[in-house]
Image (cartoon, rainbow, N blue to C red):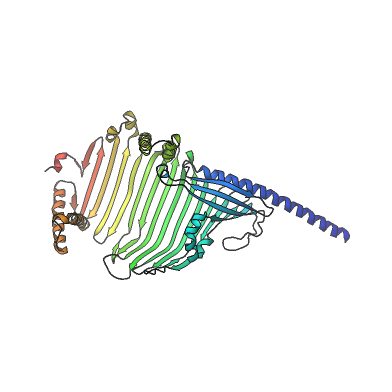
Amino acid sequence: MRKIIVGIVVALLLLSALWAGATHWFAVRTEEQYKAMLERASEGGQVKSIRFVNESYHRGFWVSKARTAVTLQHPAMASREMAPVRFTLDHEIYHGPFPFGAKSPEGQVRWKPCMAFIETRMVLDPEAQSKLKELFEKIPELASMRNYTLIHLNGSGEDHFVIPAFQYTYDDKDGATVDWKGLFLRMDFSADLKRFNGTVRMPGLQVSAKDVDLKLQTMQHTFRMQEGAHGLWLGEAAFDVPNFDFVPKEENGDFHTVLVQGLKMSTTAGASDESITYGLALEAGEIQIDGSRYGPGVFQMEIRNLDAASIVRLQGTANRVEAADPSLSAEALQEKLQAEYLDILAALLKTSPEVEITRMEFKTPFGDFAGTGKVTVDGDRWKSSPDLSQLPSALTADVQLKAGEDLVKRAVSNIIKGQILAHGGEGLGKGLAEGLMDTMASSMAAEQLQSLTAQNVLVLDNGVYSLHATFDDGQTVLNGRPLQLQDFMQ
C-alpha cells in the first residue's frame, strides 16, 4: 500500500513538473508568436498605412500582459494636413495548453487545448477619453467593447470582436431613440497571416425620430482572402442587407418612404499567373419609393488582364514618392505623382486589359432597362506606339442599351424639367405652374427623341428604344451605320 501511495505521489510530482514545463514553454512560444504577428501585421502588403509596435510585454506563469501601440497613417497627400491616428491596445494573455481563467465571448470556460487565449481592449489617450467620457456615461455598453483572439496549437487562430447591443434615447427636442442590436465579428486566420476568412454580422438597427423611422435588418458581411503574388490580396467578399425601411411619420415634401428588400453586393479578386481579374456584382430584389415598385435589378462588371506588378506599384505609389523626398511641396508632389501614374497606366495597357459590364438590368413601373458594354485595349498595338494620343487606335468597344419607350420619355422629360428649373431665375421656369412645366418638358422630350430616332442615334421598335455602338480602329458604328459628324449637324 505504501508503495502505491509513493508511486501516486511521484506520478503527481512528475505530472506537475511536466505541467509547469509545458506552461512555461507555451508562455515563451506565445510571446514569440505575439511579436511575430505584430511584425507581419505591420508589413501590410504593399500599402504601409498601419503600424503595430510592442510597447511592453510582461510574461507571467499563467497570464501575461502586453501593450501595443497602433498608428494609422493617412495617404500621402492627406497626411500633410492630418495627423496620424494613434491609440493603444492592452492585452491579457492566458497561456496554453489549458488557459485557466479565460472565457469565450459567450462567457464559457475554455477547456480545449490551445497555445493562448488573448483578451484585448482599446485604451484611449487622455484627450480622447475626455471627449468620449460623456458618450460612455450615456451608453456604458460601448466601454465594454472587447476583442478575443484564440491561437491554436499550430499557430493559426480565430478572432472575435463584439460591440454589445444597447438602447439610447437622445434628450434633445427630437428625442430620437436608437435600438442597436450589436455587432459580431468572427475571423479565422492562418499562422503566417496570409489567409483570412470571416463574417461580420449586425442583427439589426432601429432609429425612431420625430420625423422618420429607420429600420435595418440583419446586415451581414462575409469575406475570404489570401495573399497572392507580389503581396496582392485576392479572394471574395459579400455584403447582404435583407431589409431596409425608411418611413416618414408624416407626409411632407422633405422625406420619401423607401423600402428596400434583398440588397446584395459581392466582389472578387483572382489571379492567373501575373494577370489579375476583379469582379463586382450588385443586386436589389425590390425597391419601393412612395408605393411605386422598382426592381429586381442586377449589375455585374469585370476588369480583366491587369498586370499584377503594375497594380502593386499603383497601390504604393503615393507613399513611395513622398518617402523618396519628404521636402517636396504639395504642388511638386502632385506633379511627380501624375507622372508616376501615367507611367503605370502605360504599363497596364501593355497586357490588353478589358472592362466589361456583363449584365445590367432593372425593372421599373414605366418599363425595363438593360445593357451590356465592353472596352478592350490591344496591348500589341499600344506597345508599338505607347503614346496617349494614339490610344484610340488601340481601343475596341461595344455597347448595347435597351429601355422601354415610356421610361425613356420620362427620363428625358425630367432632365429637361431640371434644366428649366435651373434657369428659373432667368425666366424660363420662373412662375410656371407645375402642370404647365410638365407639359412643356414632355413636349420638348418628344421632339428630341424624334430627332434622335431620325438621326439613327436611337432605334424604336415595338415600344422599346435601343442603341448599339461599336468602336474599332478609330471608327464608330452606330446601330449598323458608320457614324459621321455631319449626321449630328443636320
The furthest residue to the bottom: 250
Q: In the image, is residue 12 above or below residue 211?
A: above
Give the residue at x 35% y 48%: 301
Q: In which quadrant of the rendered image does the N terminus lie?
A: bottom right
Residue 371: percent from the left, percent from the top?
28, 50
Give the residue at x 46% y 61%: 202
Q: Is residue 150 left or right of residue 412?
A: right
Q: Is residue 49 left or right of residue 155?
A: left
Closer-to-camera residue (75/308): 75
State how many labels appear.
0
The furthest residue to the right: 2
Residue 142: percent from the left, percent from the top?
50, 62
Closer-to-camera residue (468/222): 222
Give the residue at x 28% y 64%: 254
Q: Is residue 320 left or right of residue 68?
A: left
Q: In which quadrant of the rendered image does the C terminus lie?
A: top left
Q: In the image, is residue 173 above or below residue 420?
A: below
Quarter-of-image position of residue 366: bottom left
Residue 10: percent from the left, percent from the top?
82, 55
Residue 18: percent from the left, percent from the top?
74, 52
Determine if residue 164 is in view: no
Determine if residue 112 is in view: yes
